[in-house]
Image (spheres, grey):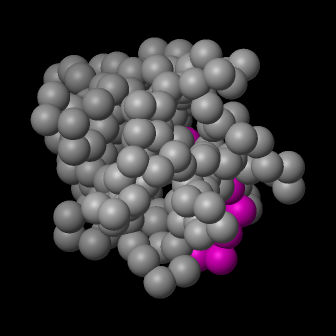
């Protein structure tokens, strides 16, 4: 995550704060934090996670004195043991690699906020509708929403159901978009 500051504040120290998904407690993040999964650039403008988990989803603030900018972190995760989720080679999205039986679970974790998070195909078709409309097999797709996560469970998808999707998040007046490629291994059914 990056906190953009104006050129006249480039050499000023920034403070990062974090509130977990289900907590009102604010934690200060720094290179001296007990959480060894994070690091900050020397200017403090960029916060890196070496490893990330659902506990890292939440509200982040970078502050310059009393002026703070807020951002939300959405954590994407493969929820079944056989699928893998990784960054794309160009770093602009994520690849969900699904085994040949076409059964997988995928989740998004985030802090509660006034807005919505959803996944849709390039043709603006919802994630589950994409699978339901294309498949000739006994495919099922279930979608569960809570204030802090969205979970998808898909069964019996085929290689033909592989697709590029967009994870869209609407936070107050801005929209963020992440590319998600779902690759289903195996043969055509």
Please say whether residue 182 is visible from this viewpoint.
Answer: no
**Is residue 113 on the magenta stretch?**
yes
- Residue at (57% x, 24% y) in the render: 31
Q: Is residue 176 left or right of residue 188?
A: right
Q: Nearer the viewer, residue 43 or 178?
A: 43
Q: Is residue 21 left or right of residue 181?
A: right
Q: Quadrant of the C terminus?
A: top left
Relative to 92, residue 4 above or below: below
Q: Is residue 22 left or right of residue 182?
A: right
> How far across and down, in percent of the image, does residue 53 sit?
60, 29
Q: Nearer the viewer, residue 169 or 123?
A: 169
- Residue at (46% x, 66% y) in the render: 169
Relative to 113, residue 186 above or below: above
> How far across and down, in percent of the image, does residue 109 sit?
61, 46
Please say whether residue 94 is visible from this viewpoint.
Answer: yes
Range covered by the magenta-colored residues: 106-115
> How far across and down, in percent of the image, does residue 126 sit?
39, 66
Q: Is residue 152 left or right of residue 167?
A: right
């Amino acid at each position: 995550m990056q906190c953009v500051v104006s050129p006249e504040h480039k050499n000023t120290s920034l403070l990062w704060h974090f509130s977990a998904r289900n907590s009102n407690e604010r934690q200060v993040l720094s290179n001296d934090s007990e959480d060894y999964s994070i690091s900050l650039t020397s200017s403090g403008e960029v916060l890196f996670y070496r490893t990330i988990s659902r506990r890292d989803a939440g509200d982040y603030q970078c502050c310059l004195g009393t002026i703070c900018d807020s951002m939300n972190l959405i954590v994407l995760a493969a929820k079944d043991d056989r699928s893998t989720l990784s960054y794309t080679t160009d770093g602009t999205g994520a690849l969900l690699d699904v085994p040949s039986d076409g059964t997988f679970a995928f989740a998004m974790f985030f802090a509660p906020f006034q807005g919505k998070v959803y996944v849709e195909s390039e043709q603006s078709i919802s994630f589950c509708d994409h699978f339901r409309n294309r498949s000739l097999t006994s495919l099922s797709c279930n979608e569960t929403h809570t204030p802090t996560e969205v979970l998808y469970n898909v069964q019996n998808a085929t290689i033909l159901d592989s697709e590029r999707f967009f994870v869209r998040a609407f936070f107050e007046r801005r929209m963020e978009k992440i590319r998600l490629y779902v690759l289903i291994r195996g043969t055509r059914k």
